[in-house]
Image (cartoon, rainbow, N blue to C red):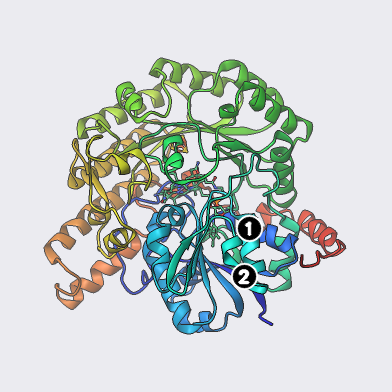
Amino acid sequence: MSRYDVVLLHPPSIYDFRERPAFYGPIADVIPSSPVFEMYPMGFVTLASYLRRHGFRVRIVNLAVLMMRDPSFDVERFLRGLDACLFGIDLHWLPHAHGALELARRLKQIHPDVPTVFGGISSTYFHEELIRRPEVDFVLRGSVCEPFLLALVRQLNGERAFATVPSLAWKEQGEVRVNPAAPAPGALDDYGLDLGMMIRHVVGHFDFWSNVPFHHWWRHPITAVFTVRGCGHGCLTCGAADAAFRRFMSGRHPFYRSPASIAALVRQFATLTRAPVFLVGDVLDGGMDYACAVLDALAASPVPNRVGFEFFAPPPAEFVERLRRSVPRWFAELSPESHDESVRDTLGKARYTNADMEAAIGTMLANGCEGLDLFFMVGLPGQTYENVMEGIDYVAGLFERFDRRLSAFITPMGPFLDPGSDTFERAEELGYRRFARTLEEHRMLLENRDWEQMLSYETRWMTREQLVDATYDAAERLSAAKVSTGRIGAEAGARVQARVTAARDIRRRLREGGSPGASPRGHEAALRADIAALASAMLHDKRELFPPGAFLAQFRLGGIARILLRDLFRRQPARA
Ligand code: B12
Ligand code: SF4
């Protein structure tokens, strides 16, 4: 009998990133992971919890983190040591097109008799192309895959009647079969995290490093509760927008987690850690009654941790006032994407004026919001270079007007257009020029050495070169505005400035040097070293968004021990 029924593996975005360092630019500047995109989909944890609850043995392996932590980590040797009935690989985010396929290929070489299953948003979109590849045996489609993966594992252990597994793409004697999609469930409450089981697995198997969600997580273990699946907004650029999901995701979206389940998950995290708990998804999208019910549930079970709220449009004043009364410590994120009302209108997230936004900023700061981050983007429909720069001047004005709890960040949309989004499907009509359509074409883009060439698009308003220029120039100006208003210190500002200068220099040297190996050996080594120095964040100081803390200060060891004890005395589920 194999040691595990399923091993879920998270690949790096580019499989050979350690041997072939590429210049990824600022594509991962405002997220916890580096451009290796080493964070695994949170769905790994809910899939593992669900299967374990049904008596199956599941292991999560964050291969990307293992490869990052130790440059001499021998991947092939590690893969050879895995003992499982099924390997699950996520191709959730398209930038993993390179790493996920290469990992599957290697697993097939080493374990030819163990099937591979792919899942995630990009796998769902590209399931027909994926299932034709020899290294892929199954693809599970859907935004909620727990019951389908369970059905697949049961069939692998039983009659192998794969035609009965909902939403499965598979092969029968070389012929591709795509089973009908099962409707997505109406609520998310059945698909949660089981922290007790997770901790017991980590402790029992001495398996901390392969489970960590991203590099350095143990230093700033931010946690998140996913309140919604899908989204009701219509951003033209988003692969999970209403129109996008209707193109390729079965079932009705969005659907929400109940207020009681949200509060229970927040409490679970607070038992474990002192770190902030972020609610992913704008609770106001579920309607005012739902959003207030979430606040009431949080108020009934208060936690000392800071709780983060995400807003897709400026929240109404009465909601913010109620938030202050319900949650002792809170912070928020608002993503206007552009300061320009007409660009915002075209983008389609939400329609509001800058005056509305400024009023909401004032209200939030007056109601105890401990930090408010605004997110802006380069690469939007209708956006020119000048327009991006005007945006930074607008933000600088906000910095003058509001206190230092308000901050802002800008990143390029990239490296890829989201498949299934309007900008991907209706590119020409919306002013986009697409450099990749198929999964294989995206994989090939990741073979490039420079993020400018990795970008899968340019727009009628900005070429790829201008998108890069706008990104660097905007970041430089934004950083200067932060220094002059005391949001970051002069030293942090100088670090950002030095990184932008280094990035421009690398770009020039890559252009002059051409393909790898074309430049003299010494130059090549220096270039690699300079690229590596910019690996984690480029245009922002990541510490601004994810302040590091010491391990012992972040975790509540007593709480962890209590969860562990409770789990040990719980009857272990029989396989059913
Ligand atoms: C929260 C979120 C994040 C979080 C990550 C949380 C996490 N670790 O999962 C953060 C902010 C870090 C993030 C970052 C990025 N994100 Co994001 N993110 C989202 C968001 C808003 C919600 C996702 C969600 O609800 N997940 C719910 C969890 C519980 O389920 P799940 O992880 O999806 O897993 C389920 C299924 O997908 C499936 N599944 C997943 N993997 C596997 C594997 C197997 C084997 C199987 C069988 C099933 C399976 O089963 C799971 C359980 O049901 C979506 C938009 C949306 N509304 O959906 C965008 C979205 C997924 N992100 C997107 C992108 C592009 C990114 C970035 C690449 C952006 C960037 N350049 O920085 C990075 C990549 C980060 C990395 N890997 O390191 C795009 C993806 C488009 C695409 N097809 O590639 C989306 C659709 C929209 C968007 N543009 O933001 N993201
Ligand atoms: S980018 Fe727009 S459509 Fe996509 S999840 Fe965010 S608000 Fe929803």
- For the N terminus, the quadrant is bottom right
Circle 2 packing at 10 Å, graded few (<14), some (14-19), many (20+), is many
The residue singled out by tag 2 in the image is 6
Does 124 sit above or below residue 54? above
- Amino acid at pointer 2: Val
Near-viewer residue (458 or 480): 458
SS label for mark 2: strand
Asked whether mark 1 and ligand 1 are closer than 8 Å, the reply comes as yes
Residue 524 percent location from the top left of the image:
21, 72
Does 463 sit above or below residue 99? above
Could you tell whether 5 is left or right of 540 in the image? Answer: right
Please indicate, yes or no, whether residue 556 appears anywhere in the rendered image: yes
- Who's the residue at 64% across and 27% down the image? 291
- Amino acid at pointer 1: Leu
Residue 84 percent location from the top left of the image:
61, 77
Could you tell whether 66 is left or right of 161 in the image? Answer: left
Residue 545 percent location from the top left of the image:
49, 44
The residue singled out by tag 1 in the image is 47
Q: Whole-Å distance between the Cαs marked 2 and 1?
A: 10 Å
- For the C terminus, the quadrant is bottom right
- Who's the residue at 40% across and 34% down the image? 235
Near-viewer residue (292 or 35): 292
Please indicate, yes or no, whether residue 219 appears anywhere in the rendered image: no
Going from N to C along the chain, the mark reached first, 2 or 1, is 2
